[in-house]
């Protein structure tokens, strides 16, 4: 009985190994392909233009906070207590303003990037399906899930070409 079980197990393993050997798998770096695409370059330029003013405000608040901090460190010992407290309060307000502006900018930019990704998703899905058919693949995995891939099975550059059509 043990022998029969071993033979059946070995047979099943041989068939599963054969099936695995026949499975054709490709790999793509979706993030690299998507963010290197022409659409992403246009999006990035538009994003920079749209938020240039907000970025300038963030840098201005950061510089003001840095200046106030330097002044506190240099001249704080020579100031009377009320001057030092006033300057420290102004520094704290500026730091809070900087944090608020930076958080708002980061949040808005992240939201816009997410919208871009969602709008690009159908095009990416279609390009991946084309790669499946063209290379007669059973599966395409994201590069983050793969330890090693033969260069000929990395289809990122082909995906980028399809996205740039």
Image: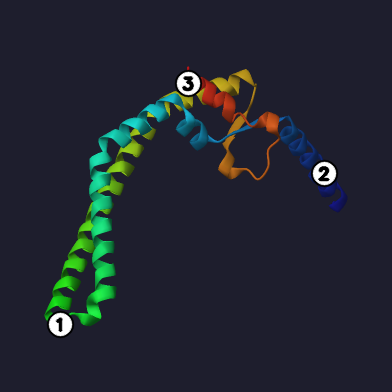
Frontmost of labels 3 and 2 is: 3
Q: CA distance from mark 3 to mark 2?
A: 48 Å
Q: CA distance from mark 3 to mark 1?
A: 64 Å
Q: Which residue is mark 3?
A: 164
Decide which of 97, 136 is in the foreground and name it.
97
Q: CA distance from mark 2 to mark 1?
A: 87 Å
Determine the residue positioned at 61% across, 28% down: 155
- The mark that comes first in sequence, 2 or 1, is 2
Decide which of 86, 50 is in the foreground and name it.
86
Secondary structure of the residue carrying numbered label 2: helix
**On the rendered structure, is 162 left or right of 16?**
left
Q: How is the image coloured?
A: rainbow
Q: Residues within 10 Å of mark 3 (few under 14, many from 20)?
A: some
Q: Mark 3 and 2 residues: CB-CB less than 8 Å, in contact?
A: no
**Residue 149: x %, y % from top left:** 68, 38
**Residue 31: x %, y % from top left:** 49, 37
**On the rendered structure, is 139 left or right of 12?**
left
- The mark that comes first in sequence, 3 or 2, is 2
Q: Mark 2 and 1 residues: CB-CB less than 8 Å, in contact?
A: no
**Residue 96: x %, y % from top left:** 21, 62
Q: Residue furthest left?
A: 82
Q: Residue furthest right?
A: 3
Q: Which residue is mark 1?
A: 80
Frontmost of labels 2 and 1 is: 1
Q: Residue 61 lies in what quarter of the image?
A: bottom left
- The mark that comes first in sequence, 3 or 1, is 1
Secondary structure of the residue carrying numbered label 3: loop
Identify whether 58 is placed above or below 152. Answer: below
Numbered-mark total? 3
Q: Which residue is mark 2?
A: 10
């Amino acid at each position: 009985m043990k022998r029969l079980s071993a033979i059946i197990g070995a047979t099943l393993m041989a068939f599963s190994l054969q099936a695995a050997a026949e499975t054709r798998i490709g790999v793509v770096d979706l993030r690299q392909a998507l963010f290197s695409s022409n659409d992403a370059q246009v999006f990035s330029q538009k994003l920079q233009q749209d938020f240039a003013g907000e970025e300038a405000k963030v840098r201005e608040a950061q510089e003001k906070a840095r200046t106030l901090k330097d002044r506190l460190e240099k001249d704080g010992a020579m100031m009377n207590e009320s001057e030092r407290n006033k300057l420290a309060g102004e520094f704290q307000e500026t730091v809070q303003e900087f944090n608020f502006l930076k958080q708002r900018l980061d949040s808005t930019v992240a939201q816009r990037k997410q919208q871009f990704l969602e709008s690009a998703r159908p095009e990416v899905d279609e390009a991946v399906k084309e790669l499946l058919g063209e290379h007669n693949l059973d599966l395409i995995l994201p590069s983050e899930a793969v330890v090693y891939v033969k260069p000929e099975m990395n289809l990122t550059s082909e995906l980028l070409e399809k996205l740039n059509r």
